[in-house]
Image: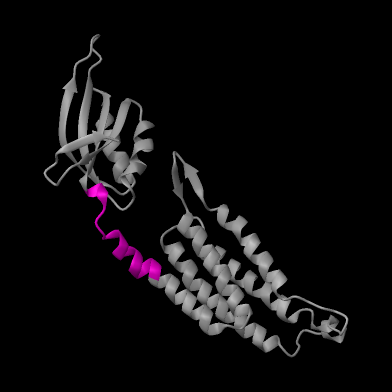
Amino acid sequence: MDAFVGLLHDSSLVEAQLLLITFVLCSLIGLERQIRQKSAGFRTHVLVGLGSCAFTLVSAYGFSAVLADEVMLDPSRIAAQIVSGIGFLGAGVIFKGHNVVRGLTTAATIWVAAAVGMTMGAGMISLAALLTFLHLLTLFAVAPLVRMLPSQDRYRTLRVRYADGAGVLRDLLSKATTMGFSSSVIKSRRIECEGGDDSVEVDVQFHGRTPLRDLLPEFMDIQGVERVSLRVDDDQNGNDSDEI
């Protein structure tokens, strides 16, 4: 049991190096989330990576003192528990409301940070570095290119019917701007109702990074909105097809 006594042992230098490299790589992953002001930022990703690396190092070196001919250890058991446990942490940063799911990318980055920590704990430095590079390449280079691909939302408009005279259109456009959409009103018409409670029906085209369907539940929560429908243009000239 002498291996449990003292601060240093044969693998201490290797373990310290692997932890330091894990800190650097997971810092790069966490900084990207921190810059984008996500729910899990720099500290979360660094701690997840360091924890995963430490658990993997324990499974590799921590029980060497009790090994004997009659003692069999499976180093992969602790690593398997890391994979299971990190799923609960990732689920904590996913938010769902009004049929809109947010936080999936942040949950995935936590998963990647854990993978980096585990590969570093296993001594696979080149794999951990390549994984970090591909992760950052995906978020900084590939993702913007994907958003530039043509989307069917380019030929869609939202038709909103709301109560006249209550400032609803201002609230609609303000909500869309908050969610990162730019907007242009295509046409509008007044609908006269018996009893004097007139309504306005307006067609608005929105442009943004998120899917246009995300606006529907948000608009329905605005007081005075009576109906929201998504319409598809047959071509760029604006011919309407059936409502969705």
Q: Position of residue 231 (x, y in %)?
A: 24, 37
Residue lying at the far left of the rendered structure: 237
Residue 140 counted in the magenta span: yes
Q: Is residue 244 left or right of residue 186?
A: right
Image: 2 above or below 146: below
Q: Going 56% across and 63% down the picture, which residue do you hit? A: 44
Tell me where residue 200 sits by quadrant.
top left
Is the C terminus in the top left, top right, bottom left or bottom right quadrant?
A: top left
Q: In this orientation, which residue lies closer to the viewer: 211 or 34?
A: 211
Image: 167 above or below 8: above
Q: Going 11% across and 44% down the picture, which residue do you hit? A: 237
Q: Position of residue 20 (x, y in %)?
A: 58, 80
Q: Position of residue 128 (x, y in %)?
A: 53, 78
Q: Position of residue 184 (x, y in %)?
A: 18, 42
Residue 118 counted in the magenta span: no
Asked if one can make out residue 5 in the rendered structure from this viewpoint, the answer is no
Image: 189 above or below 142: above
Q: In this orientation, which residue lies closer to the viewer: 163 or 84?
A: 84
Is the N terminus in the top left, top right, bottom left or bottom right quadrant?
A: bottom right
Q: In this orientation, which residue lies closer to the viewer: 24 or 190?
A: 190
Q: Is residue 75 left or right of residue 6?
A: left
Q: Going 61% across and 74% down the picture, which residue do you hit? A: 118
Q: Is residue 168 left or right of residue 133?
A: left
Q: Which residues are magenta?
A: 138-154
Q: Is residue 88 left or right of residue 155?
A: right
